[in-house]
């Protein structure tokens, strides 16, 4: 989502006459686009700001800007305490050029109606596009800062999304990921998310469509039906579980139980047999006992996710969870995280190995980082695949056979 916002801001600044440089030494303005979801990410940004400031002594004209959630959360404090020049909140990007021109400091007024609709992002990739379909969030999961910094949910007009997807397909961006904090609650006039997907599936120039993130409480049967019927929608869903313990899920204000979650997984697997399921999970939410944590590990064993983004709980300003008694000590959060990551690594390894010998479809996204004679891409079920190829293969679909797995990459043989 931050990548998409960086592309939006790039587009606004390019339109105003600025240009992107490929080498940081050539920059007159360094922009940090930030995330506030976990404290660790914020600390890294503050560390990077401190290290990049030495450039100001070489180039006195150099300015440093912070945009995104951290800009929204910390505002002018970033200027007063960290020596940043510009701070631009998540709803104020249209005024960023004016801020630079007038050499002013911070603009962070929230505008819960801002959707940036009509602004075409500057897509960095030559093969894939991220397209924001909604902004903000109404869910107030008790650990999460997003609703406080990003404001209430608002959806972009379906017509504009469809136009953007068409334009992307025409310029070779044939793999689309639709973005929103909870895409299942997309709603614009009489168009809900499954209806939007139906319309996008009909666009000829597009090969693949994915979307993140789905909230388990809002994932409808209609969505599962559309996914099963639509040839361009990939056999993959990202469905954050967060915890496998019902008391913790209730304290998180997630509004579903583990039974409900598993029921959705069963429906998805019945309707779309080869579907890959990825998730987000956290350890050490306040009050999480060893038994509750074990419920999460058991759920992971039972569900067998293809991949899981695992986090240790990070208390965030203003959130309800940060005020709960029974905060779990850092060492325990970390120790549980390690056990969780090890378990998932083992499950993912088996999932990848199970692919050996099968035929897969790879969309070639880039040259391989390791070899000039290989290309890299993804299977429809969101696994990284590497096969022999050249620049000419970028943006094409290859039919391939999986010959080996490294545990997180499939090595394939081109059979197209
Ligand atoms: N809207 C999406 C993504 C939100 S942020 C969703 O609901 O799934 C991405 C992930 O960060 C979340 O799924 C959650 O697992 C994690 N996260 C959010 N707040 C967190 C916190 N305070 N500490 C640790 N992880 C957090
Ligand atoms: Fe945060 Fe929950 Fe909204 Fe996701 S759905 S952004 S976790 S409040």
Image: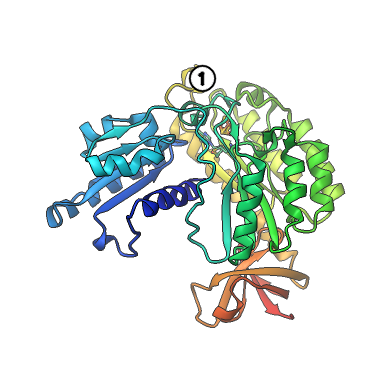
Q: Can residue 271 be seen in this snapshot?
A: yes
Quickly name the residue at label 1: 320
The residue lying at 67 percent from left, 75 percent from top is 412
Quadrant in the rendering for residue 110: top left
Query: Which SS class for mark 1?
Result: loop
Q: How is the image coloured?
A: rainbow
> From the Cβ of disc 1, is ligand 2 less than 8 Å away?
no
Q: Quadrant of ligand 2?
A: top right
- Drawn side of residue 51 relative to residue 246, left or right: left
In this view, 396 is above or below 156: below
Is 70 located above or below residue 177 in the figure?
above
Q: Is residue 148 above or below residue 33?
A: above
Please state the horizontal and vertical placement of residue 194, each as a whole percent of the image.
Answer: 76, 42
Is residue 343 in view from this perspective?
Answer: no
Q: Residue at x 73, y 56 (%)?
A: 234
- Number of numbered discs present? 1
Crowding near pointer 1: few (<14 within 10 Å), some, many (20+)? Answer: some
Q: Position of residue 404 (x, y in %)?
A: 67, 73
Residue depicted at 68% across the width and 33% down the height: 185
Image coordinates of residue 184 in percent, x first then y, are 70, 37
């Amino acid at each position: 989502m931050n990548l998409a916002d960086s592309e939006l801001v790039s587009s606004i600044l390019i339109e105003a006459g600025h240009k992107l440089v490929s080498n940081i030494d050539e920059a007159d303005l360094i922009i940090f686009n930030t995330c506030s979801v976990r404290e660790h990410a914020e600390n890294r940004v503050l560390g990077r700001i401190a290290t990049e400031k030495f450039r100001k002594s070489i180039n006195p004209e150099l300015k440093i800007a912070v945009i995104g959630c951290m800009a929204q959360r910390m505002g002018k404090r970033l200027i007063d305490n960290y020596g940043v020049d510009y701070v631009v909140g998540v709803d104020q990007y249209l005024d960023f050029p004016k801020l630079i021109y007038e050499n002013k400091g911070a603009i962070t007024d929230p505008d819960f109606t801002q959707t940036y609709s009509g602004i075409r992002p500057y897509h960095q990739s030559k093969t894939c596009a991220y397209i924001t379909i909604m902004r903000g969030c109404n869910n107030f999961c008790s650990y999460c800062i997003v609703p406080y910094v990003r404001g209430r949910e608002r959806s972009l007009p379906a017509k504009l999304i469809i136009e953007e997807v068409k334009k992307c397909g025409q310029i070779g961006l044939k793999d689309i990921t639709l973005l929103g904090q909870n895409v299942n609650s997309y709603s614009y006039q009489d168009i809900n998310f499954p209806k939007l997907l139906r319309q996008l599936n009909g666009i000829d120039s597009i090969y693949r469509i994915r979307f993140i993130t789905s909230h388990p409480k809002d994932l409808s049967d209609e969505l599962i039906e559309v996914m099963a019927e639509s040839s361009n929608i990939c056999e993959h869903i990202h469905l954050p579980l967060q915890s496998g313990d019902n008391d913790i899920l209730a304290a998180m204000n997630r509004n579903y139980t583990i039974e409900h979650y598993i029921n959705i997984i069963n429906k998805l697997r019945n309707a779309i047999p080869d579907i890959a399921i990825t998730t987000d999970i956290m350890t050490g939410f306040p009050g999480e006992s060893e038994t509750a944590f074990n419920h999460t590990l058991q759920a992971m064993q039972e569900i067998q996710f293809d991949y899981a983004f695992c986090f240790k709980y990070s208390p965030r300003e203003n959130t309800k969870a940060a005020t709960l008694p029974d905060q779990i000590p850092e060492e325990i959060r970390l120790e549980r995280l390690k056990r969780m990551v090890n378990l998932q690594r083992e499950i993912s390894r088996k999932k990848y190995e199970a692919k050996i010998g099968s035929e897969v479809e790879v969309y070639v996204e880039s040259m391989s980082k390791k070899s000039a004679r290989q290309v890299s891409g993804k299977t429809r079920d969101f696994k990284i695949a590497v096969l022999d190829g050249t620049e000419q293969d970028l943006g094409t679909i290859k039919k391939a056979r999986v010959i080996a797995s490294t545990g997180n990459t499939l090595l394939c043989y081109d059979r197209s």
